[in-house]
Amino acid sequence: MVSASPSEAASTMLHLSTLGVQAVIWMIWSVTPLSYLYLAGSYAAYKGQLPSWMPPHPFPRLHYGYLFYALCEVVFSFYHAYLVTKVQQPGPPPNFSKKLLRTVLIRALETGMDDEDEDEDVNADISGTISRAESMERLGGSESNAARNGMRMRRRERTTSGSSDVKALGSGSTSPIPLSQTPSRAPSPIAGHSRLRASSVLPSFAVARPLDKDDVRARRFRDELAMWFIDARPEDVTARAVERWLAWSLYAKELEEVEVEAENSRVIREQHASATLRRGLPRLSSGATVAAAVDNVMPPTPTISPPPSPLPPSHESFPPSPMPGREDFGESRRAHQRAEEIGRKLDEEDQTSTEAVEAARTAAEYAAGWSKPGARLEFLLWCREMFEARQGFEFPRRATSWNESVGEDEESIKNAPHARAMRLTIDPVRVQSRPLACYLFANALSRFTVMRAKSNGFSLEQEGRLRYLIRRPPRWTRQLAEARDARTASLHRPIIFLHGLGIGLGQYSTLINQLATSHLASPHPILVPLFPATSQDIFDDNFLNPVGHHEMTATLRVIIQKEHWHRCGITILSHSMGTIVGSWLVKSLGALVRRMCIVDPVCFSLWVPVVIGNFLYNKPDTPVRHLMRYFVGTELGTAHALSRHFNWASNILWPREEIQNLLSPHHTRIYLSEQDAILDAKANRRYLRSFGMKDASEGGGLTMAKGAAHGEVLMAGGRHMRDILAWLDEPDA
């Protein structure tokens, strides 16, 4: 008899455990249809129409209890179905400027170019490029400026003076030399890319150090991009498929909408040009007069202020605060109320279809860089060419899986079956029904956690639409937090905990209890914002109206000002989806965030669809992912928040550019879970180490929790949780 190998035994156990999890999920899901059957059977019994072989219920009181719940379940199922239909409506469209999208794109594409294990001499000075030191000198003489720029610029020469110059993003124009005259080591992969050739700023891989398609960095990028396409191999990703994906990721639109917009703009401009010529205006051979005349008859550019940034408000300043004992919340309070109101309106603006909002949005396109006819389509094609340069070859027009029935003409290519991409905010919201009992249980657990926290000194308060728990130590004073002595001040610095999505605050019950009962509670104020939209709090007014990033940061600034924390700074502890809110605060508050501990981050490398793939698209392949998909990923509120209110360009956190003191383990700690079913912990570790972070074993602030699952780092009594509590109470030097 041949015994099974260990791998076969493990596979069998995994299969059995998966079947067990699926059975549990099916049993919970079946509560609703069984309630329908029970209600129908009870009605038949009431009418005396039950079969003779079916005896009456032996426990009448229990029967009425079941009957009452079944009736509630049936009514709730109709309400839930109505909400599922409601959330299918499109979410707020993004309001990103061209400059922002270009900067974010180039930063993302430059990621991985300097990986030490892939290219040791990537920073070497080569002909036709600017060295790192020279680039820093030209960009202002500081490494931080070069880091913010996020790329190595290629050298451009002014044809008029012959002097070299560098054109940074948003700077004035220069006259580029032809690409054929730009020396490089290998043939450029963008030789036929007119849009990239016309660009004055390009990353190194586009011209200076062109990548070969077999380069490990090009292959990795190609594989990561293919992850956006469901069940598709890299060779099946066509140019048209990428353009469709780009139309969503840049504008939350279908590609056909962008093409129609460009065509309509072209037709309108041609009509204005014809009208201008018919009026007998002079026409020069150069066409300059015609262009000027066309501009005269085109609709004038509205005089407006720049559009509201899609990023959280800047961290420029807080209103001046009075001296202790002379607090007067008059003007500063009103200023923050105005900021909060502006933030709320920015987040709700796109949900209103009035003519005024539509006119304002049209006007904002001028300031955002989209006023030129066909600007969106041109930028989209520029992005596609940039992708082709990054992977070392052009996307094929035809997929390898197509047969000869697909013609070579442009129309046939457009109508062919291209690889289907994940397009989070325009795809249907994926929701699986669940019984009322699931929501009752989650809400009861959260209510119990709040009651327990209140018994430990927390109070439940509300600012605007944001509810939060706050604990104010009896002996904490503003003077202690603002003490000149750094050690004294740091020992009284407020802590903000930002929880993740799931079943609500209940899953963090032990953590909040530990914070409230540990030695941290005595000197440190603690703030815990509540996020009902991702906490299965279906009875909350804001369940399907999540607080957006503008309103969230504006409201938290009000709270920080009111509590006098804007002078002493704050410490942020964030987990999972809470790291997104943490990234908003870092962008908004800047240096006010003195220290931060990030656990299981989902705010890094958002151009790789690991999180949304595992959560919403990929077929679950483990018992944990089956549980996560049903109980969290396809829950109504969570699915709606992710599918209609996830703005990747504002959610992403850039470690080097936005985290101050990234390399200091006293100021920045990041914990990754080795067995995380949501994130790619190893890829995140490699990404963070590329910025100079070191593992904890090397004296750095990066920790890979061996064998830990998502969220296990924060388990009360665990080694890592003890480390976090000790770090939170660690004084400044």
Image (cartoon, rainbow, N blue to C red):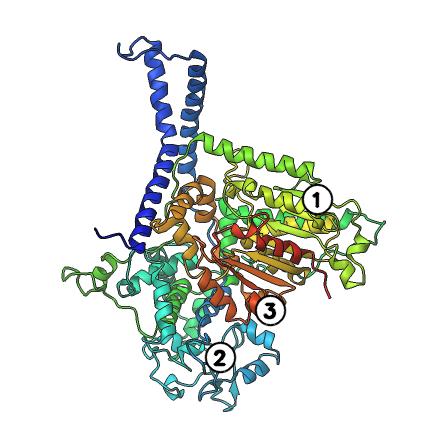
The three-letter code of the residue at mark 2 reads Met
Label 3 sits on a secondary structure element that is loop
- Helix, strand or loop under label 2: loop
The amino acid type of the residue labelled 1 equals Arg
Residue 266 percent coordinates (x, y) = 36, 63
Q: How far apart are marks 3 and 2 (CA)?
A: 34 Å
State which quarter of the image contains the C terminus: bottom right
Marks 2 and 1: which is nearer the front? 1
* Pointer 2 residue: 153
Q: In which quarter of the image is residue 664?
A: bottom right
At a point 68% along the width and 37% down the height, the residue shown is: 454
Residue 126 position in % (x across, y down): 45, 87
Quick check: can you spot residue 532? Answer: no
Q: Give 388 or 212, whichever is nearer the viewer.
A: 212
Residue type, mark 3 in image: Gly
Q: Residue at 33%, 17% (x, y): give it.
A: 41
Decide: few, some or many residues near mark 3? Use Cα within 10 Å; few <14, some 14-19, many ≥20: few
Q: Which of marks 3 and 2 is in front?
A: 3
Q: Is residue 625 left or right of residue 523?
A: left
Residue 240: percent from the left, percent from the top? Answer: 29, 62
Q: Which residue is at 51% across, 64% downward?
A: 100
- Is residue 88 placed above or below 726 in the rendered structure? above
The residue at the far bottom in this view is: 162
Q: How far apart are marks 1 and 3 (CA)?
A: 33 Å
- Residue 684, compared with residue 624, is above or below; it is below
Residue extending furthest top? Answer: 48
Sequence order check: which comes first, mark 1 or mark 3?
1
Specify the label residue 471 is tagged with: 1
Q: How far apart are marks 2 and 1 (CA)?
A: 50 Å
Q: Name the residue under label 3.
A: 699
Does residue 132 appear in this view? yes
